[in-house]
Image (cartoon, grey):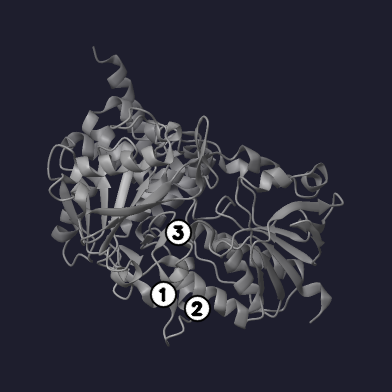
């Protein structure tokens, strides 16, 4: 093995493991340094009872969700053997429906199965984009705003819509409470991002991807795993990397990155200096800024903006139940929950995960819940999640879910135990989140580095890197890992084939309109749809 092909991957989350896998398969000598006791980052599973270990119940930061536009991460999963003659991608199972739940009624159920007729497609989309309550004229206005985004060129999206919030873009202040509830604020439960802060480019683009996924005849609209994430995906991945010769070192936190002002010269790992020829920084967005020395900033100038990237909280709790309460055959979205809560009832998908055997017969069901707004007062204690204790946060989340489903569906006596994300720790001021989530706020794109940095031997892999999948997701992390691997290949002049990377796809039928808009943008002209929109806004302002 030539010395120039030694690579140190700093971080063993989805991005770091992806880069390690691609480079190892191309003959590189790869070492991964991971701070935790298992790989996977936010995606990993953890024993609920340390004494029982992996043979007992497993908890997670939150349920795993694979919408139709996830391409990079699924292709990686297809190449990882599960140990039973299949790939880990075979452990992805489609959902059948989504529940849009309200506190004042039964809510609506939308099918996530592939529609076979236009009528079925409209029936599936109506609850998701309208909630059955939005006035038709406002729904038409919302669709017109999506049409503007869908027919805009990339340059306009990056230079105009990046500077505008989603809330402003869809005129939420001018619309009814139902419009704001179902079309503006509902995005927060999907991306942990307040619509008032998220850029129209990011939120709108991902919103389109989720809607277009309902139309794709080649992939389910959404899938989930058929067991705990580490058990059916991450542990087999670790084993596959071992077989490829990757040295995965757990409980090895990176505490410093050394640079001579031009390139990286070494890293401190748990008090020891280690060196390599190439480095891939796959560290969390809240860790990397702490390692930016003046020398490293000179070597990789684009990293300086990372410390200005904002984060939010998106954390989960698993409720273990003495009965299997399916709720719905997929995701439930609790639209009246102040903490922007969603859930998945896991037992129906975990065919080979015997909850009863892992709990001495006490547990038959598990409801996995994610809360995405920790800044709004709740219904039980009238204070934000950040100000709660761990127990208060659990009780608050339970109360908000129960308020939507009703005590008959989700009775208190069904609870056996729970597992709250351990990254939430108590302080005298409230909770501290040791694993926040990147959020793409207005004008934040310029703060995010390309995977290929200015330092000749440093690449960045993380969901905060500048990639096409512009949202903190497993797909963005996988794309960043692939692009970082290509940066290493380019830096070392490797003859090996470059890693294939997929961006976000939109219907080709709109390409002619995008080309026309690109010409208008270069001439300094607005999008045609914005001309009518400006007139609409003026009429609203002049209305008595």
Find disc 2 in the rendering and name its residue: 80
Give left or right: position of 195 versus 37. left
Helix, strand or loop status at disc 2: loop
Q: Nearer the viewer, residue 144 or 31?
A: 31
Can you see residue 71? no
Estimate how packed mark 1 is, as few (under 14), some (14 to 19) or many (20 or more) residues with alpha carbons within 10 Å.
many
x%, y% of residue 326?
20, 60
Find disc 1 in the rendering and name its residue: 89
Find disc 3 in the rendering and name its residue: 504
Which residue sits furthest top? Answer: 544
Q: Is residue 359 above or below residue 432?
A: below
Q: Is residue 354 above or below residue 420?
A: below
Q: Nearer the viewer, residue 358 or 448?
A: 358
Give left or right: position of 287 versus 358. right
The quadrant holding residue 167 is top left
Q: Are marks 2 and 3 in contact (CB under 8 Å)?
A: no
Cα separation between marks 1 and 3? 20 Å
């Amino acid at each position: 093995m030539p010395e120039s092909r030694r690579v140190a991957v700093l971080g063993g989350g989805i991005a770091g493991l992806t880069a390690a896998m691609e480079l190892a398969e191309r003959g590189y000598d790869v070492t991964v340094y991971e701070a935790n006791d298992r790989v996977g980052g936010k995606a990993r599973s953890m024993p609920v009872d340390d004494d029982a270990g992996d043979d007992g119940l497993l908890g997670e930061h939150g349920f795993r969700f694979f919408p139709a536009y996830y391409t990079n991460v699924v292709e990686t999963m297809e190449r990882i053997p599960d140990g039973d003659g299949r790939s880990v991608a075979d452990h992805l199972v489609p959902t059948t429906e989504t529940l849009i739940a309200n506190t004042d009624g039964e809510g609506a159920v939308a099918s996530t199965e592939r529609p076979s007729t236009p009528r079925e497609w409209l029936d599936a989309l109506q609850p998701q984009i309208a909630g059955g309550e939005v006035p038709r004229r406002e729904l038409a206005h919302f669709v017109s705003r999506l049409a503007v985004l869908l027919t805009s060129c990339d340059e306009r999206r990056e230079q105009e819509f990046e500077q505008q919030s989603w809330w402003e873009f869809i005129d939420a202040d001018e619309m009814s409470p139902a419009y704001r509830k179902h079309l503006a604020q509902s995005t927060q439960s999907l991306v942990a991002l307040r619509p008032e802060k998220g850029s129209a480019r990011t939120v709108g683009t991902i919103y389109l991807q989720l809607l277009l996924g309902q139309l794709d005849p080649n992939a389910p609209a959404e899938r989930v795993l058929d067991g705990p994430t580490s058990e059916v995906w991450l542990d087999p991945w670790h084993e596959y990397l071992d077989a490829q010769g990757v040295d995965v070192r757990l409980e090895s936190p990176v505490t410093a990155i050394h640079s001579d002002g031009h390139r990286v010269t070494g890293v401190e790992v748990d008090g020891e200096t280690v060196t390599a020829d190439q480095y891939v920084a796959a560290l969390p967005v809240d860790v990397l800024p702490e390692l930016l020395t003046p020398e490293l900033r000179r070597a990789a100038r684009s990293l300086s903006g990372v410390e200005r990237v904002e984060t939010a909280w998106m954390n989960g709790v698993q409720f273990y139940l003495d009965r299997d309460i399916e709720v719905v055959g997929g995701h439930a979205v609790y639209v009246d929950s102040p903490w922007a809560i969603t859930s998945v009832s896991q037992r129906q998908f975990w065919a080979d995960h015997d909850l009863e055997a892992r709990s001495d017969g006490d547990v038959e069901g598990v409801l996995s819940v994610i809360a995405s707004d920790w800044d709004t007062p709740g219904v039980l204690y009238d204070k934000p999640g950040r100000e709660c204790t761990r127990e208060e946060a659990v009780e608050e989340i339970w109360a908000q879910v129960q308020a939507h489903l009703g005590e008959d569906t989700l009775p208190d006596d069904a609870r056996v135990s729970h597992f709250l994300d351990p990254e939430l720790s108590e302080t005298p001021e409230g909770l501290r989140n040791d694993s926040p989530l990147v959020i793409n706020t207005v004008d934040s794109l310029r703060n995010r580095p390309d995977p290929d940095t200015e330092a000749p031997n440093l690449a960045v892999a993380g969901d905060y890197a500048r990639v096409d999948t512009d949202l903190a997701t497993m797909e963005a992390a996988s794309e960043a890992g692939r692009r970082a691997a290509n940066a290493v290949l380019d830096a070392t002049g490797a003859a090996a084939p470059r890693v294939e990377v997929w961006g976000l796809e939109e219907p080709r039928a709109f390409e002619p309109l995008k080309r026309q808009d690109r010409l208008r943008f270069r001439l300094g002209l607005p999008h045609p749809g914005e001309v009518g929109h400006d007139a609409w806004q003026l009429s609203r302002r002049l209305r008595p």
